[in-house]
Image (cartoon, helix red, strand yellow):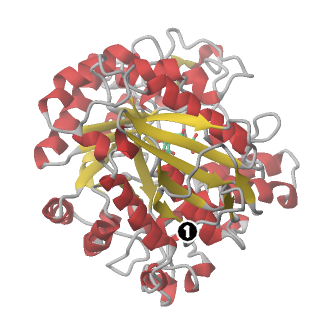
Amino acid sequence: MIRKEEEKWWKELVVYQVYPRSFKDSSGNGIGDLKGITEKLDYIKSLGVNAVWLNPVYESPCDDMGYDISDYRNILRDLGTMDDFKILLNEAHKRNILIIMDLVVNHTSDEHEWFSEACKSRNNPYHDYYFFKDARNGIPNNWVSFFSGSAWDYNEPTDEYYLHIFSKKQPDLNWENEKVRREVYDIMKFWFEMGIDGFRMDVINLISKKPGLPDRDEDEDLAESYSFGPKFHDYMKEMNREVLSKYKCVTVGECPGTTVEQALDTVGYDRNELHMIFHFDAMPLDSGPNGEHFYPGKVDYQKFKQVFTKWHKALYGKGWNSIYLMNHDQPRAVSRFGNDGKYREETAKMLATFQLSMCGTPYIYQGEEIGMTNCHFEPEEFRDIQMINYYAEMTAKGYSKEELLPGLLYKGRDNSRTPMQWDRTKNGGFSNADNTWIKVNPNYEKINVDESENDPDSILNYFRKMIKARKNNKTLVYGDYDIIEPDNEKIYAYKRFTDNDELIVILNLTDGEVTFNSGYNLKSKAEIIGNYSGTKFNKKNEIQLRPYEAKIIRL
Ligand code: TEU
């Protein structure tokens, strides 16, 4: 039995995700920028992380906040210049922080010159870069967009429909066309030659489409219907051979709708494709009874435990995982998986204990380390195309604001996109502009980096300690995992172990006191970290966990 993973530098990363528009505005235009990130590199370094994943910074009309790229070799003017980028890269490297860029190549912007050309005529050399279908027979299939409505839009000059799985300003690239693949590999080389350290690959499992683009089964999960077409692994192997294998780099594929089997086929150590993927299995645990996405649900912790246990068992020793609780597409972790009221501090620390003690590379999203929360928005304050389109679609169907808002406010992507809260000054220290591109969460006066720095028991300082604990205890990176008392609804407890080391992680999932009576005598054992000071034992020497108490003990 394998009880320890093979050691690799990319398995030891702790990645910090920066959403550039909302991190730090140095120019005063109300939009975060590259210089702002450079200014804050010492802060990022102080967390103990060793890599930054930057959401897209390329030229873009920003219909989907940069996930609609019009020039892959230039920087979006709002965010700065190529020189600013090179300075950021250089300053990050000086601090031993790797830079992971976002590679968005399932689609381009409709304002990319390839698409402008492609639309001109059926004979245009770029026409076959995208999916066009003759309009004579009506809309080509029943595919719908992730952002509401049909996935097809009309192109007048050629009398055709073109495919866009996301917004109509994000036409899908045709990967069957070898020229498209060459273009992508050239773009990747361009950035690697500049010195970047890796790519997070946007919806990479959608690049190979089902042959003939057949109608989808409407009951099926949207991502599943579009994902893992028959050529996907060929493309990944080709990309690896042509580009990735030539550089020292790290790769993570964003793969919505992935099963463990599909994941293993992508990240398996014998596959030569990607290092790790983001799976989505923990994301719908609070969806509505019919799978409704915008639904004010409640996370089912039993299912949460099952998801993470299943993924560990499937991948351990065979392929590598990534661990995240939120990102720029998900609501704030503490509001969703924790409790952003009375127990914000305890639950944020409990979630950090979980995230940083699992097998797989942890990804921390900006603001998660200070326990930033979801934010209230009125519909006119929405900035995210997914929220805006959904709200318009549903109000047109007769739903009221009162019916729609709870789900949108619970799940909406704008929650995670509000600016980083640095201090108590105007706009939370994010920007000195009178208008920021998106609302600043008014709770910045209480929740901000400055306050957290001054409090040794803050969530921020707990994150730092937990990241250090992971670095100092390689068992947390490489060890195997076993769940303890899987059916206990109040506790999530597990062991991380190698042949000569055993750690036990105990999380109280409730706001009440709970006894951990699993038979271990833990009284004389060393505590590695905990979100309360000391450990409470009862007369039987069992641990008495306080509300949302989290701790790691060496057995
Ligand atoms: O996200 C893909 C994706 O699966 C999301 O659209 C997700 O389904 C949705 O946000 C759930 O709330 C990636 C990017 O991370 C996202 O920001 C982009 O909008 C999208 O691809 C298109 O590029």
Q: Does residue 442 lie above or below 383 as drawn?
A: below
Q: Amino acid at mark 1?
A: Gly
Q: Is residue 243 visible?
A: no
Q: Does residue 20 lie above or below 143 as drawn?
A: below
- In this rendering, position of residue 220 left or right of residue 145: right
Give the residue drawn at x 67%, y 68%.
340
Q: Quadrant of residue 266?
A: top left
- In this rendering, position of residue 245 left or right of residue 333: left
Q: Does residue 299 lie above or below 228 as drawn?
A: below
Give the residue drawn at x 17%, y 27%.
245
Q: Is residue 321 visible?
A: yes
- Residue 407, position as x, y percentages in the image: 76, 53
Q: How many marks?
A: 1
Q: Quadrant of residue 305?
A: top right
- Residue 54, position as x, y percentages in the image: 34, 54
Secondary structure beneath label 1: loop
- In this rendering, position of residue 509 left or right of residue 371: right
- Residue 141, position as x, y percentages in the image: 63, 18
Give the residue drawn at x 55%, y 64%.
349
Q: Which residue does the numbered mark 1 point to in the structure image?
A: 371
